[in-house]
Amino acid sequence: MLRGLQLNPDQLGIDELAATYHKIGLKRDRHIFALNHRDKMCAMVVVNVADMGLNMSDLTNSVQIFVINGQFLTHEIIQTTISAVSKYLEFEEIPVLFYPRKAATQAGLDYEKSYSLWVYDTHKNLDHYFRFLKRLLKFIRP
């Protein structure tokens, strides 16, 4: 999941998509923070920001919280964190995605929806995929 979302340490400085958007005058940014307790990371917080025209869903402008160790995360700490990073987003209501769901429940957070994340590494598997698709489409005639 971290690799697919480009959150591994070796991928954090790589944001070609944002640079491409900026070149054509659009905003598509990502801000990444670590939430620590006594020098140990408890969660990674990602703030996604995009122009309204690029916001195909509420998830384009959102806060994502990836809990690594939820032992010290309380409802108050999470609310304070969301409040602190909300300065990057210009909305009254901000979608917050919390992973794993169990950590949200343990921190006493209510949630409206539950999503499944599916990550597919196209760099490693694209050739296999297109071979499969070609075989599959042979049987489908318009």
Image (cartoon, grey):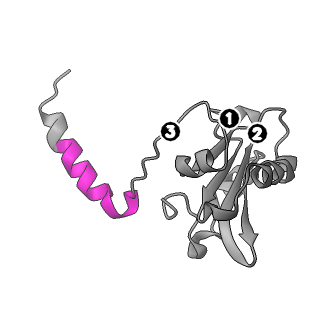
The residue indicated by pointer 3 is 115
The residue indicated by pointer 1 is 55
User: Looking at the image, can residue 15 be seen?
Assistant: no
User: Looking at the image, can residue 113 be seen?
Assistant: yes
Q: Is residue 127 left or right of residue 31?
A: left
Indicate the amino acid at tag 3: Tyr
Task: Write the start and end of the magenta stretch as one range.
Answer: 121-134
Mark 2 surroundings: few (<14), some (14-19) or many (≥20) residues within 10 A: some
Q: Is residue 83 left or right of residue 48?
A: right
Distance of mark 3 from mark 2, alpha carbons?
23 Å
Q: Is residue 52 left or right of residue 90?
A: left
Distance of mark 1 from mark 2, alpha carbons?
7 Å
Q: x, y (%) of residue 123? A: 39, 62
Indicate the amino acid at tag 2: Asp
Front residue of this view, candidates 7 and 34: 34
Q: x, y (%) of residue 118? A: 42, 47
Q: x, y (%) of residue 38? A: 75, 77
Single out the residue that lies furthest toward the bottom.
39
Q: x, y (%) of residue 31? A: 74, 59
Q: Earlier in the sequence, mark 3 or mark 1?
A: 1
Residue drawn at point x = 20 percent, y = 43 percent: 134
The residue indicated by pointer 2 is 51
**Image quadrant in which the C terminus is located:** top left
